[in-house]
Structure formats: structure tokens, C-alpha cells
Amino acid sequence: ILIFDHVQERMLTRRYPRITGEYFTYSYALVFTNRFWTLIMSGGLLLYLKPRRSKSTIIYEYSFPSISNMLSSWCQYEALKYVSFPAATLFKSFKLAPVMAMGKMLGNKEYPQYDYVVALFIGLGITMFMSGSEDLEFGYDVHGDKASAAWTGVMLLGFFLFFDSFTSQWQSRMFQRHRDLSMIELMFATSAFSTVLSFITLVHTKELGPALSFVVQHSEIHLHFFLFSICSTIGQLFIFYTIKNFGAVVFAIIMTTRVLLSIALSCILYGHEVGSTGFLGLMVVMGAVCYRIKRKAEGKQLIRWQGIGDEKAMELVQEWHEHADM
């Protein structure tokens, strides 16, 4: 996952060839590549594991989370043109707030009081981090072009949170309505829709030709596309395995560590500067996240060696979307 983060930032924020070349600006090409390989992986899992097939779902139900999932990916890729990778990564920790809001809207769900407090502190920490990051120049994108709005990057990240929270809550709602639906079948159907829709979008926006031409002309990006696809696919497989076999708490700890390592690696490799206010904001966010993990772990077994069965698929989906962004 750390390699995926690094490659994503390299592809979207650096030139090909370095220093004197041009930028790869075709975000939907990355969305298509990501969803296509996820489709292949989930199809393989369907053939290998042979889960029960749902007989109650209607095919159009898969289109809603597919569209929102595709849009959320596009928003997070585009946001990297306007904000630094560390800021975008930390901003995603605020997923808790829109997930709870969407859960209230779509499923009338109840959440513990400490979740609201944690969401408040995460929001405060993110505000401190972004205001204390010296390289964040709102109003200009990473390519040096003037943005159409001062807070374009923040707006895109906000849309990312909205679409991603809708995806997780809609999928949870599907599991509630269709008890015979398996996680792998949902992953396969969603990926199939997203692959087709992202390809149609590439063709409609006339980005398919230029994207292919860019890849052909710049040999350096070949390795990056390969790593981006493989790391995304294997990363999702390991996420699925970790949640299913070790539980949500262990997964949350791993993903929190991943956030810190990704930010540190990005700062080292790409020279992002974070001031004292930004560092304090980072600590506030991490403290709030760790406190929530501690509260969720109270009275529970830390590692679930017995795994999570298909009847807990809704929990798996919620944890996946709350912490992962692939």
C-alpha cells in the first residue's frame, strides 16, 4: 500500500521525463486501470472461492455504488493537483464524519457519542495541518496553473469523502436487504460496472487517445502503471484478508500506521515541508484516531483468528471504506 501511495503521487505530481517533461493529467485513465485489475482479481476470487450467488439482488443496484466509487477515485486523484499528498492523505482521516452523516440519511444508524467527539478533533487537526503546511498554495495547482477557485483541492477532497461515504453506506444497505449477497460478488459486480463506466468516460471526454499516446511516448511511466495496478490489486486483496481474518481493530491500527508512514515517505522523497502547527495538527488527528481504536477495542478480542463470516460482510465493507482509499 505504501508503494501504491508513492507511485500515485509520482504519476500525478511529477513530470515525464523528470524536470523538463510534461505531466500525466488523465485521472480517469488511472480510475479505469484500477477498476479493471480489481475486476480481474475479484473474478478470480469468484472462480476460486465459489461463494453463494445472490438471487435477490437486481443488477441496477450495483450501478449506484459503482458510480460513486468511480467519482470518489477521480476526486482524490484530481485533488493531488491542488494540495500536497500529505495534506490529502490526512484529510481522508475525516471520513468518519460523512460516513456517520450518510449512515443517518440512508440507514437511520446510531453512533456512539465518542465518534462525534473524535470527528470534531480530526477536523480540528486537519485544519491545523493544512494551515501549517508551508507548501500548500491554494489557488494554484501542482502544474503551476491558476486554479478556478481558491479552495479547489479542498472541495475535491470534500467530494471524495461524500462519494466514498455514499458507496460504503449503500453497500451496507445492500447487505441488509439481501442476506444472500457475498462480499466477493459485490466487489466483482461493482468493479464490472466501474470498469465499463470509466472506459465510456475516457472515450466520451476524448482522453483515451491522449492517455495512450502519453504512455507510449514515455517509457518511464510503464513501470509506474504496472506498480500502480499490481499494488492496488494486491493491496485490496490483503485488506480483504486482514479484516476478514484479524478483525477491524487490527486493520485500523495497520491503516493508521500506514497514514503516518505515507506522510513521512512523501515528505522525505518530495520535500514537503510541515511547520510546527502542521505537526501539532497531525498529532491531534492521530491521537483522535488512536483513541477511537481503543474505545472500539474495549471488551473485544484484539485479533479474531477465527475470521469474519459472510454474515459480517456489512462490517467488512464499513471498515474497508472507513480506512482504505484505493
Image: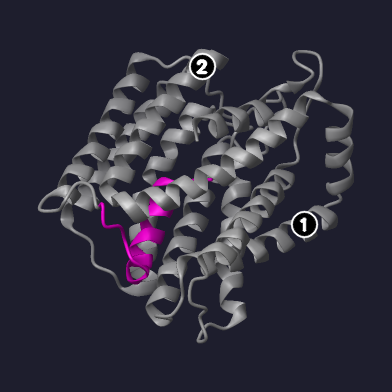
Q: Secondary structure at mark 2?
A: loop
Marks 2 and 1 sit apart, C-alpha to C-alpha, by: 34 Å
User: What residue sits right under mark 1 in the picture?
Assistant: 199
Looking at the rendering, the stretch of residues picked out in magenta corresponds to 305-326
Q: Is residue 294 left or right of residue 316?
A: left
Q: Earlier in the sequence, mark 2 or mark 1?
A: 1
Q: Is residue 323 left or right of residue 10?
A: left
The kind of residue on which mark 1 rests is Phe
Q: Would you identify the image quadrant in which residue 211 lies?
A: top right
Q: Is residue 314 left or right of residue 265?
A: left
At 17% from the left edge and 48% from the top edge, which residue is drawn?
A: 297
Q: Would you identify the image quadrant in which residue 294 lies?
A: top left
Front residue of 84/321: it is 321
Q: Is residue 278 left or right of residue 5?
A: left
Q: Main secondary structure of the magenta part?
A: helix
User: What residue sits right under mark 2 in the picture?
Assistant: 272
At 33% from the left edge and 72% from the top edge, which residue is drawn?
A: 311
- The C terminus lies in quadrant: top right
- 215 relative to 161, above or below: above
Q: Secondary structure at mark 1?
A: helix
Question: Residue 15: where, in percent of width, then height?
Answer: 74, 21
Farthest residue in the front direction? 48
The kind of residue on which mark 2 rests is His
- 94 relative to 126, above or below: below
At 38% from the left edge and 66% from the top edge, which residue is drawn?
A: 313
